[in-house]
Amino acid sequence: MSSKTEKNGDTKSPFAIALKAINKQFGPVRANQDIDLNVRAGTVHGIIGENGAGKSTLVSILYGFYTADSGTISVNGTPLNIKGSADAIAHGIGMVHQHFMLVPIFTVLENIILGHEGQKGLQAGMEDGRAELERLSNQYGLDVPLDAVVSELPVGIQQRVEILKALYRGAKILILDEPTGVLTPQETDQLFEILKTLRQQGVTILLITHKLREIMAITDYVSVMRGGKMVAHLDTGDTDPTKLAELMVGRPVLLEADYPDANIKDVQLDVKHLSYQDSAGAPVISDISFALHAGEILGIAGVSGNGQSELLEILAGILQPTDGDIHIAGKHITAEQPLGPAEVKALGVAHVPEDRHAVGMVLPFSAAETSVLGYETNEALGDSWFFSPSRLKTHCAKLMQAFDVRPANPSLKSSQFSGGNQQKIVLAREISSDPKILLVGQPTRGVDIGAIEFIHKELIALRDRGCAILLVSVELDEILSLSDRIMVMNNGQHMGVVSRDEADPQKLGLLMAGITDGAAAS
Amino acid sequence: MTQNQLPRWVDIGLLPLINILAAFIVAGIIIALVGENPFEALAVMVKGAFVYKGSLGYTLYYTTNFIFTGLAVAVAFHAMLFNIGGEGQAAMGGLGVGLIALWLGPILHPLFVVILAIAAAAAFGAIWGAIPGYLQAKRGSHIVITTIMFNFIAASILVWLLAGMLIAPGQMSPETSRFEEGVSLMKIHELANYFGWKMARSPLNLSFVIALLSCLGVWVLIWRTRLGYVIRATGFSPKASIYAGHQPARIIILAMAISGALAGMMALNEVLGVHERVILNFTAGYGFTGIAVALMGRNHPVGIIFASLLFGALYQGGAELDFEFQTITREMVLMIQGLIILFSGALAYMFTPWLARFFVRAEGQNG
């Protein structure tokens, strides 16, 4: 990608966005400290940083969700006082949120003109809107079916609707918050093509992400945030992923580890013709079969929302299958004879849930209390009825030491730990139960790079001790670097299993999009 | 802005004090408006609650009721259940006491009858709490609605029985006959006099001690047992609780049973301690005020003891106010109580943002 030649930022005119000495404090937390940021008009400017670095706060201030405690915001050289998102829109700032803000049962057209229907009556407003949108679609090369119902569109197209919505409201500056989290690799490429067209048409783009690859692929400039501060402003062409990662974390990190091959043993978990329908009767998982062996990591790849989460919850006993057979440790589980979470756990199955905030831990609990969630009947913690707080703390302190949790304070509330440390607590709890099977969902979501490295090593070590690990992740890099075999899911269906040696992002991306035919790959 | 940002002592100590102060200031303004001196009124109230002969006993007698109903609300709240049914559970507890006392009173030794009556108060209250718990857990009927309806059902059952089957023969008021001699909880002043300790007469009885023991029991239950752990986990995060292999339905029913049992034991004070018979409407709104008590006491037994003491003092001192001043009527005293409930209940977190800003600024200057 030759971003240098395509770079067309105008250096003479005032900056599209100029932030000066922005400060924002939440209670004792200084989310933004003296942030300066200059974004040249007509460029793609990336902001990269780990979760909790203050990226979202900064963007929220720019878009008017928060008001800065101090500092100035200038747009195209004019100092502004942005009090709400309406002010931001009025000054040509548009935002595409990580979670789309669309009405699922409305058509694309209805969604886009929502709130801008005009004064002449709905029908006339719709006609005006259609004409304007067709013009915008042509200008920016955003191909969107205006009369399709949003809920029936793929995620990638829904995102285009969001972009079009911002442009329709007159946005000349577009903020994208983690836009690729829900996309397949192919959809990501398509999004980047759109962003390039937008840039050619003079739109300024501010891209918020934690993915180094995206910064390198699309941006002209990049600003790095760490711990609420801006630590560097760089020309993307002058930097590389290793350097950026080091700036984000504050120390050198190993970006890609090469783990030894697995020593695969006997089958621990056997799933045959598993199906699941949600409460409305819609099929979520359709006829899935696979086997999981001791000593291997089976990765499940797929775009978020294609049945992987439900598969994990069914295996953990939280959801009950509607059809099919599951064999765990000689126990036969069917729709007629389901097992609950406690019984599945008793078979030696540990589960690191996808949503650690709502499911994996109880946020108001102390770390010590969270560190026994699901294992509170453990006899080491006290006699049959009573807990011994001191034993609880000793138990937690041991886990914290083994998993390098910081701060190593068992009395601190679970919510007061960073994402990475919370995940380490959950992982430590589940791994310490010495499971035969470990179900892991999104082990590194919202986790800082340093902790990712640690968590991956722990998972490999557990695999090498003979545990069978089922890994669900939307991070393709994570699946590729950890899994011994990779199963791809699309729309609740099993798209095929690829071995580690054969897997590459392109191949998996096609399967994730539901394309199995080899001919379609060319 | 949430209260989490405040230092703990501010959240559980200073904030409730400020709320009460605000209520007293508003009440003082109103007293001044009707032409009385608010400071004099306050002095009368404090003397009426703590200083006059026997007044402390009365204050603690009221306090006992509030401790039971406050604990009941608190236990349910730890499972994120809003038990509005303290009134009905207390009424049913009273019925349990009455049935045991009237049935076994003539047969068994009074000591056994009292012990069984205490168990009956808890059991009847527990059942009256567990049914709405069951309906919530298994049928999805909202606990707030069902507990309110169960208050009405309990009240109707008591009217039906007290005006019918259980009415004391030869008179018209809806109440049972008096229990057998000795089927009661001993008065504290009698106990004191027995040990040669002079104490003025008051209705304060041994149920106060049971209330304090219940506080200890609730503390142990919630923070020191596995059951309490599971109750809190279910309350904070039902999803996490299911994930951990708990059975939220069972926990909801159990928490409501415990809550109902505590509310039911309020009847020990009124029925077994004071009236020694079941009279209509002996619950007198204590079940509802328990909600304010729990809210003010932050659902912690220690907080509930202090909040109950405040409400006890308001009840007793308020009566004195009504007595001393021509222009201050009973309704006015109710209004002061209402203001306290308003400021420490409904508006409990009104001053939080203000305090938070103050402490953040103070911290900024120190750091």
Image (cartoon, rainbow, N blue to C red):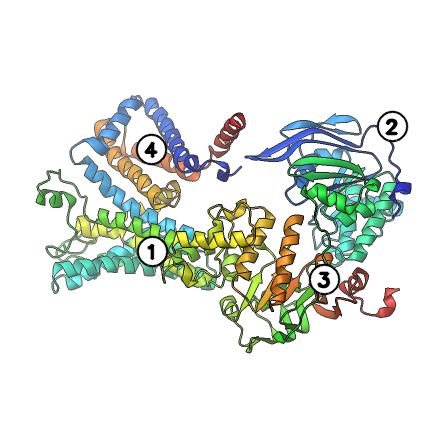
Task: Return the residue at label 2.
Answer: A12
Of callouts 2 and 3, which one flags the residue occurring earlier in the amino acid sequence?
2
Quadrant assignment for the C terminus of chain A? bottom right
Chain of the residue where label 3 is placed in the rendered structure:
A
Give me the disc on residue B260: 1
Identified by mark 3, the residue type is: Gly
- Write down the quadrant of residue A177 in the picture: top right
- Write down the quadrant of residue B122 in the picture: bottom left
Q: Is residue B336 left or right of residue A426?
A: left
Task: Look at 15% across and 33% down and name the residue there.
Answer: B53
Task: Provide residue B112's location: percent of width, then percent of height.
Answer: 16, 61
Task: Return the residue at label 4.
Answer: B336
| Discs 2, 4: same chain | no
Chain of the residue where label 4 is placed in the rendered structure:
B
Give me the disc on residue A302: 3
| Discs 1, 2: same chain | no
Task: Provide residue A500's location: percent of width, then percent of height.
Answer: 75, 66
Secondary structure under the numbered disc 2 in the rendered image: loop
